[in-house]
Image: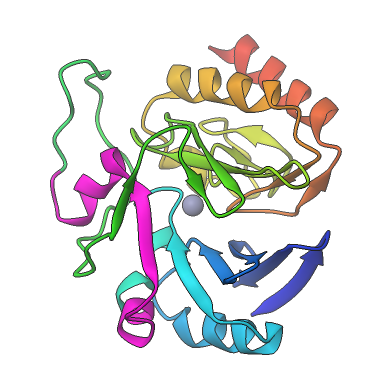
Amino acid sequence: MKVTRHGSNLVKLTRIWVMNCYLVREDDGLTLVDTGMGGSADGILAAARAEGAPIVRILLTHAHSDHVGSLDALHAQLPEADVLITARDARFLHGDKSLDPGEPQVKLRGGYPVCQTTPTRLLQPGDRVGSLEVIASPGHTPGHASFLDTRDGTLIAGDAFQTQGGIAVSGMVRWMFPLPAMATWHKPTALESARRLRQLDPSRLAVGHGAVIEAPGPAMDRAIAEAERSL
Ligand SMILES: [Zn+2]
């Protein structure tokens, strides 16, 4: 696990070059944002030990396998930690892959593994999780969420954007790393979400795949303009 620090509260954990999850420092311990692919639990737990604080909650951006893959293994070792995901993407965790009547009726993409772990709290947009505000950012998945650290404007955007191979809105292919684009459910919804995230004017952008970007506004603008041209 490669560990990098960004500001005073964000620790990025990277496995296999491109698979990120994050530790967010809070007064009561650490919030883990996403769990990586299967086999990431030991590295995450070691990183938390090195930070000298316990993981008190596991927060998920969405239900794809590269983000929830180590959820069950972590839950087994951290049975007291809260597990939080949007109500919409929680349905995937127990194998319900139905679409709602109001949603675009297009095929789901990417892997949605069934998990044994039951979330302890289902999130709605606007909820607070420690210092993080839940921002709806559907498109990559129907219930994808991003998290804005209200202390310093850090935005943890999951796969709503990627920065690996160049910044891109979810659904736009980067040939150096096309997996997130190939797993995107509905591109027009993803573009709307990208605009909403840009309007938050984040100070820092942290994503599921790729480097953290400081002062990301211009880069987000470029990515949004490219997505607008292509849709
Ligand atoms: Zn991903």
Q: Nearer the viewer, residue 90 or 37?
A: 90
Q: Which residues are magenta?
A: 73-96
Quadrant for the N terminus, please: bottom right
Q: Nearer the viewer, residue 209 or 122?
A: 122
Q: Nearer the viewer, residue 209 or 199?
A: 199
Q: Residue at x 42, y 39 (%)?
A: 144
Asked if residue 125 lies left or right of residue 147, the reply is left
Q: Residue at x 58, y 71 (%)?
A: 28
Q: Residue at x 53, y 24 (%)?
A: 193
Q: Residue furthest front?
A: 27
Q: Is residue 131 visible?
A: yes
Asked if residue 108 lies left or right of residue 143, the reply is left
Q: Residue at x 42, y 81 (%)?
A: 39
Q: Is residue 41 above or below residue 206?
A: below
Q: Position of residue 191 (x, y in %)?
A: 54, 20
Quadrant of the image occupied by residue 223 = top right
Q: Is residue 64 visible?
A: no
Q: Position of residue 208 (x, y in %)?
A: 58, 53
Q: Position of residue 196 (x, y in %)?
A: 59, 21
Quadrant of the image occupied by residue 48 = bottom right
Report if residue 83 lies within the magenta region: yes
